[in-house]
Image (tube, helix red, strand yellow):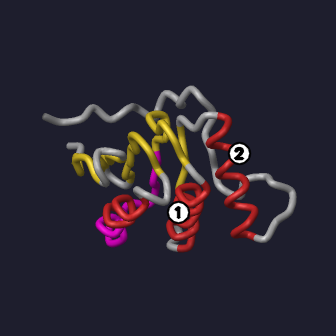
Amino acid sequence: MPEDSGTNSGSLLSTWTEHDHDTVRLELRGELSARTIGALERHLELLWGCAERLVVVDLSRLSHIDPTGARVLVGLSHYVRGGGGTCSFTGATRPVRRLLAEAAAAIDGTSDGKPQIPVLPVPDPPSVHPIAPTG
């Protein structure tokens, strides 16, 4: 069943989480920026102890992302991969994919600008389904 964190940081960012077997799906809605990143980081702290091996982050409902938000998402990807899991991003628009690639290049020290993190093409593969908010 999905967990709704509600709205955070003055209703600028909402998160929904769904756990299913060895997969956790995180949906972000609204603005992911330096102003809202604290709310996401607090939500992610709840996921650190989870045993899921696959983390899918749905970005299709982001209205805005800045470089700070992109760096946090790349950091999440590195954390999950470091623990032997897989982290994928889905629903990313072209500008979001560009920011993720730039953030990954800056963090990884690569200069080709190619993302070092999996960004699934739009539309989502059939096995990835949207989260229906509860309530």
Q: Earlier in the sequence, mark 1 or mark 2?
A: 1
Residues in magenta, as a range: 44-57
Task: Using the numbered discs, state the Cα–Cα distance from disc 1 to disc 2 in whole angstroms.
Answer: 15 Å
Q: Which residue is mark 2?
A: 98
Q: Position of residue 50 (x, y in %)?
A: 32, 66
Is 38 in front, or is 81? 38
**Circle 1: residue type:** Val
Estimate the x, y position of residue 109 in percent, counting from the top left.
Answer: 78, 71
Identify the residue under disc 1: 72
Can residue 45 be found in the magenta stretch? yes
Q: Which residue is pictured at 37% across the width and 55% down the height?
A: 22
State the image quarter where residue 86 is shown. bottom right
Q: Secondary structure at mark 1?
A: helix
Q: Residue at x 67, y 35 (%)?
A: 94
Q: Any mark on residue 29, and which?
A: none
Query: Residue 122 placed where, x, y %?
Result: 60, 29
Residue 11 seen anywhere in this rendered image of the structure: yes
